[in-house]
Image (cartoon, coloured by chain):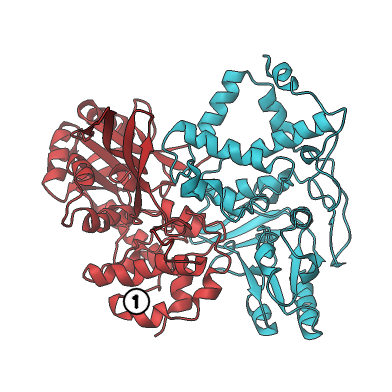
């Protein structure tokens, strides 16, 4: 696949369709991939990588890249296309300036899961028939491929590309995913249990803002939490209220716009399952306003930006809040 | 050297915690290790390092500096400082132990930061030699020996016993306080373990990384390098690298209005943030390129320029493991280096 992608990129650069390519660059180790923009065939051949670790969603970079002169080729996985569509819908990217090649999605691997098995000194990772052969300073280790996949891939919602100019590989289907299982589990907890769960998770927050900064739905020019004039600017989780407030406000702000790409949880250095907050909103929107998938299209009205006479009444908050 | 059998660690921790607060690295449910206040029954983590660095003990993420209480026209200034209690941090790795030396250069230089000094004076750092370094480790680049950590006292394991030795008076006082649990031990096996660790350190992928071409005299060539654009292009501008870093020491001071007074607090700040060092005219570093450059120039050029050649990094590798886009000081050094 990597070879086909490099060839495609070289061809599109050569025939003038695009003048830049956004993809992923090889790192020091097997897993430390960095999103990068390539401008020449030589750069592509030397550093372009597409493998089990190229999980980063590059759609958000297109907010900036698509406003530059010329046209950029973006290789988008199915989940990334939902983010891109949503950004198009919100007029954050210039669609005409991006040439999208749809590429197969995951499951992608999570190096943290390999390390959590106690495997250290990783020098190389190979997938042989869904068994990972991991070369380490301490000898070879193995583990099942599926035990090392990213959480976002374990609950994949769709293998379908919702936007592209051309595809490499076959088109997939929207999946019947299990992504709301954990949300249901949380819903079935008592209020105290749920509160304890979230305090346990959110108290780990170091306010690095990685979740917000990676989020394709968080594209405000100036976030309210970075604005000294807002009155709520804060750089540190000074107390438990602030820890909660930041994440809950963020979840509210992206409600109805979050495509469930899972990047927030992927990048959290503290492994906080932030995506569960977003999924709760998605699940509620589905049940209260009818099935809706953000990023599926670029023209429909989002449930929270729309008014219908049969919309649920505000009393639903009270009704659902009863234990 | 004095030693205690590894299966008697519980007894050791109980003895230490009976007289002062003890912090040890323990495993969290998700597998990450973090320092916790010791309570009977806690197990020492076998993880190579804690997710957050040990700097938190001396330089916490937030702390109150002073309170102001308003009553009519009067403002009462309340000093909230309290003398810290004695405490022990056990199991600090060689990289984090060196980070304290670096933080000391910032906070204990005139004018001395009394908040930091208070905790430093009352904290005893007991280190633990590494036996299983990993691919992201490069402490050797900064002259740190993972098999011989600094600290007030250092511990070494040979798989059966924990050996302990003092490096200074504070460390000796610590050992004296637990001496009834210790016995003299033969270090032959330990020396073999240490030799093996040093062999592994030589085989690590970053073993050959050096600071030879960095330092205070390289300001112009690196500041003006044309590599910064490419290096910083996918930086998210989050603060992960700075907040997991054991040597990043920048902070902001802010006033929190309680409605009937002010709490003046300081909290970690990050040069990656858009409002870092914001002044009346705005942020002097307008784009992420400049903010990104600041972080690495500080560690590789400005800090050694002001601190007799000491670099602002200890090679713990946390930023290598945690950066959401896997951009880090090693990649920067390799891309930037002019030989």
Q: Residue at x 56, y 59 (%)?
A: B236
Q: Is residue B285 left or right of residue B123?
A: right
Q: Chain of mark 1?
A: B
| Residue B67 lies in quadrant | top left
Label 1's element?
Answer: loop
- The picture places residue A97, in percent across and down from the top left corner, at 77, 71
Is residue B29 among what the camera can see? no
Instruction: Using the rendered view, name the quadrant where residue A133 is placed.
Output: bottom right
Q: Residue at x 58, y 48 (%)?
A: A211
Residue annotated with mark 1: B214
Between A47 and B217, the one nearer to me in the picture: B217
Relative vertical location of residue B313 with respect to residue A145 in this rendering, above or below: below
Q: Residue furthest left?
A: B169
Question: Measured from the top left, where is residue B76 in percent x and y?
Answer: 22, 31
Colour red, chain: B
Left or right of residue A117, residue B22 in this image = left
The residue under the point 33% across, 72% down is B301
Toward the viewer: A8 or A60? A60
In the rendered image, the vertical position of residue B277 relative to residue A253, given as above or below = below
Q: Position of residue A204 (x, y in %)?
A: 48, 38
Q: Which chain is cyan?
A: A
Q: Residue furthest top?
A: A323
Q: Is residue B126 above or below residue A216?
A: above
């Amino acid at each position: 696949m990597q070879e086909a992608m490099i060839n495609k990129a070289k061809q599109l650069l050569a025939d003038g369709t695009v003048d830049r390519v956004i993809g992923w660059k090889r790192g020091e180790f097997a897993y430390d991939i960095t999103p990068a923009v390539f401008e020449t065939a030589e750069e592509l051949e030397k550093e372009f990588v597409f493998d089990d670790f190229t999980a980063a969603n590059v759609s958000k970079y297109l907010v900036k890249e698509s406003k530059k002169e010329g046209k950029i080729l973006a290789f988008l996985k199915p989940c990334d296309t939902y983010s891109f569509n949503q950004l198009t819908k919100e007029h954050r990217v210039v669609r005409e300036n991006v040439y999208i090649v749809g590429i197969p999605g995951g499951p992608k691997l999570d190096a943290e899961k390999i390390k959590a098995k106690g495997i250290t000194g990783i020098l190389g990772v190979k997938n042989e028939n869904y068994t990972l052969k991991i070369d380490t300073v301490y000898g070879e280790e193995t583990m099942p491929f599926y035990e090392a996949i990213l959480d976002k891939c374990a609950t994949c919602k769709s293998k379908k590309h919702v936007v592209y100019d051309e595809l490499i590989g076959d088109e997939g289907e929207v999946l019947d995913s299990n992504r709301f299982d954990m949300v249901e589990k949380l819903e079935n907890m008592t209020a105290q249990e749920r509160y304890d769960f979230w305090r346990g998770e959110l108290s780990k927050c170091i306010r690095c803002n990685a979740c917000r900064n990676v989020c394709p739905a968080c594209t405000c020019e100036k976030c309210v939490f970075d604005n000294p004039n807002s009155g709520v600017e804060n750089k540190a989780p000074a107390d438990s209220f602030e820890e909660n407030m930041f994440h809950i406000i963020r979840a509210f702000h992206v409600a109805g716009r979050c495509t469930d790409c899972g990047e927030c949880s992927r990048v959290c250095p503290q492994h906080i399952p932030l995506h569960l907050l977003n999924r709760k909103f998605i699940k509620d929107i589905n049940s209260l306003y009818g099935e809706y998938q953000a990023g599926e299209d670029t023209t429909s009205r989002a449930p929270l930006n729309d008014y219908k006479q049969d919309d649920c009444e505000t009393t639903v908050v009270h009704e659902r809040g009863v234990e | 050297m004095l030693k205690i059998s590894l299966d008697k660690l519980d007894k050791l921790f109980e003895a230490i915690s009976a007289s002062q607060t003890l912090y040890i690295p323990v495993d969290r449910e998700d597998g990450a290790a973090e320092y916790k206040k010791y309570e009977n029954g806690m197990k020492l983590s076998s993880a190579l390092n804690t997710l957050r660095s040990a700097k938190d003990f001396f330089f916490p993420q937030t702390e109150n500096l002073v309170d102001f209480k308003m009553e009519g026209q009067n403002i009462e200034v309340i000093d909230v400082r309290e003398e810290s209690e004695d405490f022990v941090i056990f199991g600090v790795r060689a990289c984090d132990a060196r980070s304290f030396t670096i933080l000391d250069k910032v906070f204990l230089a005139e004018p001395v930061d009394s908040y930091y000094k208070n905790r430093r004076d009352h904290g005893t750092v007991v280190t633990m030699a590494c036996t299983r370094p990993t691919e992201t480790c490069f402490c050797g680049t900064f002259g740190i020996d993972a098999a011989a950590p600094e600290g007030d006292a250092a511990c070494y394991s040979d798989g059966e016993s924990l050996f302990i030795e003092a490096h200074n008076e504070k460390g000796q006082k610590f050992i004296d306080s637990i001496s009834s649990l210790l016995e003299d031990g033969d270090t032959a096996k330990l020396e073999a373990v240490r030799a093996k660790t040093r062999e592994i350190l030589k085989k690590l992928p970053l073993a050959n990384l050096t600071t030879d071409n960095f330092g205070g005299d390289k300001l112009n060539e690196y500041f003006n390098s044309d590599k910064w654009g490419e290096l910083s292009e996918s930086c998210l501008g989050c603060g992960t690298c700075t907040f997991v870093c054991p040597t990043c020491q920048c902070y902001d001071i802010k006033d929190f209005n309680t409605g009937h007074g002010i709490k003046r607090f300081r909290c970690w700040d990050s040069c990656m943030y858009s409002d870092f060092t914001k002044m009346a005219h705005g942020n002097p570093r307008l784009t992420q390129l400049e903010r990104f450059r600041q972080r690495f120039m500080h560690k590789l050029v400005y800090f050694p320029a002001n601190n007799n050649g000491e670099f602002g990094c200890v090679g713990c590798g946390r930023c290598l493991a945690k950066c959401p886009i896997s951009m880090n000081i090693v990649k920067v050094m390799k891309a930037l280096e002019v030989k």
